[in-house]
Image (tube, rainbow, N blue to C red):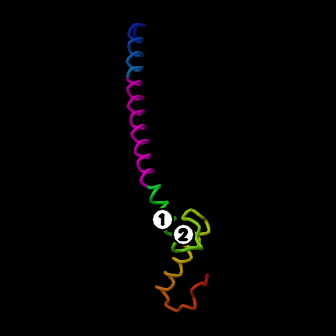
Amino acid sequence: MSTVAELHQQLETLKKRNGDEIAQATKEVERLQKELEDIAAITEPIEKEINELQRQCMPGRRNRNDSKSSNSGASILSNVMLGLVDPNDGKCKKR
């Protein structure tokens, strides 16, 4: 059987290892958070530009995240696919 001193030493070793693992995981989380912030800083202006271009080119559309606009995008896609499969324009849904 282990003595109290040996058990205490094992406990201290485990605490140190656990502390090191927590510090390592915290550092990784901070790195990932910074990476996410960098990505957001890059994508936000692009999203704004996309929304502005859509507003200018397609006045009926509000923005990319609008559920209506995503449905109309799906409708446009389905019409294009239908046109590729069956070039008869009569089968395309009118908006």
Q: Residues within 10 Å of mark 2 (few under 14, many from 20)?
A: some
Q: Position of residue 63 (x, y in %)?
A: 56, 65
User: Measuring 48% from the left and 60% from the top, which residue is drawn there?
Assistant: 47
Task: Specify the amino acid type for callout 2.
Answer: Arg
How many callouts does the rendering have?
Answer: 2
Q: Nearer the viewer, residue 48 or 64?
A: 48
**In the rendered structure, which disc, 1 or 2, sits on the residue that comes first in sequence?**
1
Q: CA distance from mark 1 to mark 2?
A: 8 Å
Left or right: 84 with respect to 58?
left
Q: Of helix, strand and loop, which one carries label 1?
A: helix
Q: Position of residue 11 (x, y in %)?
A: 42, 16
Is 18 within the magenta? yes
Range shown magenta: 17-42
Is 22 within the magenta? yes
- Judge whether 65 appears above or below 20 on screen: below
Residue positioned most to the front: 56
Q: Tell me where residue 5 sits by quadrant.
A: top left
Left or right: 69 with respect to 31?
right
Q: Position of residue 65 (x, y in %)?
A: 56, 62
- Judge whether 75 appears above or below 83 on screen: above
Q: Nearer the viewer, residue 91 or 51?
A: 51
Left or right: 22 with respect to 91?
left
Q: Are marks 1 and 2 in contact (CB under 8 Å)?
A: no
- Judge whether 10 appears above or below 30 on screen: above
Q: Main secondary structure of the magenta part?
A: helix
Task: Specify the amino acid type for callout 1.
Answer: Ile
Q: Which residue is mark 2?
A: 55
Q: Which residue is mark 1?
A: 50
User: Measuring 54% from the left and 65% from the top, which residue is drawn there?
Assistant: 64
Q: Residues within 10 Å of mark 1 (few under 14, many from 20)?
A: some
